[in-house]
Image (cartoon, helix red, strand yellow):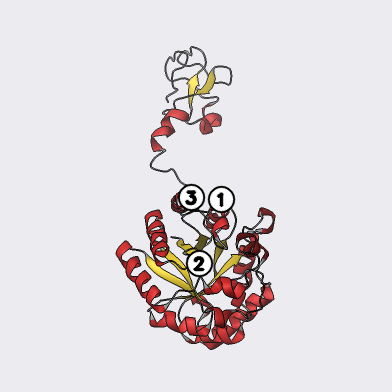
Amino acid sequence: MKTLIIAEAGVNHNGDLVLARQLIDVAAEAGADLVKFQTFSADRLVTIHAGKAEYQTKTTDAGESQHAMIRRLELTRDMHDALIVHCKLRGIQFFSTGFDVESIDLLAELGLDRFKIPSGEITNLPYLRHVGRYGKPVILSTGMATLGEIEAALEVLEHAGVSRDRITVLHCNTEYPTPMVDVNLRAMLAIRDAFDVTIGYSDHTSGIEVAIAAVTLGAAVIEKHFTLDRNLPGPDHKASLEPSELKAMVTAIRNIEEALGDGIKRLSPSEAKNKPIVRKSIVAAVPIRQGEVFSASNLNTKRPGTGISPMRWDDIIGRTAPRDFVADELIKL
């Protein structure tokens, strides 16, 4: 199964179209399947009095409101159009998270073939209904959510018009960066088992190892933030991968996909040539004369494995030698 890798540009464009295009270039060169931005209006998303998350306060002006910070990171309709064009030029699919119903409608108009629901909207009933009515595939992030809240969101989406087999549920932790002790990657499996859904992982840890581990556990989707430079100003840069790290993650995931295989234990083509070299055969431990009885005292097992398998040891013991054998000679009957 090929993992859908979403390179999350998010708001790391800092409201700059040139920077956004460069992020698309990086995602395409890394080999990601989708490059994802965020579509929202500050006025529709947050009140003017809303505070910022702790990690946002640390990475941006502490005196600035969340509303003011988010307003600087909005993408206009024209910017969306330009980014879609650039994605087509670079051979990577444009994707975006819509944070309100108007943004969902815009993304639908732009031709997106699926929707991404962010963790913060998992308890937003009218929003969930609106997304569900489109009937398009949905990727649902579950940061901060309980199993009960996930179940409720799934029911809303289904009742609105999107079938469960078109929903992928991403395990997620919304702290940037997520401490390893809080990752709880096995919760992804709990989600799969509880709701019989396709699962994935939205990774906010530092580094790439947890995303790779998620693939080994069966994640069908991996989402990971990236940036051009972690030292750039903005709320999410510090917890994002730099270009070389994103490429390393994609390469590692593709390698893991191949390495997982089909689960059937068999002799592989690459190791077949080693079989006669490293396995053993029954050999003469000492010179053996014709008619002598084979015994544990005159037989041994040694490489190569081109003779009688040591698994036939009990069959050979007690038989008589059909001819003379010199020491170390493969026994032949």
The quarter holding residue 271 reads top left
Q: Which mark is residue 245?
A: 3
> Left or right: 314 with respect to 91?
right
Q: Nearer the viewer, residue 254 or 208?
A: 208
- The percent coordinates of residue 81 (x first, y second) are 36, 75
User: Which amino acid does the dot numbered 2 rest on?
Assistant: Val
Q: CA distance from mark 3 to mark 1?
A: 11 Å
Where, quadrant-wise, is the N terminus in this rendering? bottom left
Q: Nearer the viewer, residue 4 or 96?
A: 96
The quarter holding residue 197 reads bottom right
Around disc 3, counting alpha carbons within 10 Å, would you say few (fewer than 14), some (14 to 19), or many (20 or more)? some
- The percent coordinates of residue 20 (x first, y second) are 42, 64
Which element carries disc 3, helix, strand or loop? helix
User: Which amino acid does the dot numbered 1 rest on?
Assistant: Glu
Against 153, is 219 above or below?
Answer: above
- The percent coordinates of residue 42 (x first, y second) are 55, 78
Comparing labels 3 and 1, the label whose residue is closer to the camera: 3
Comparing labels 2 and 1, the label whose residue is closer to the camera: 2
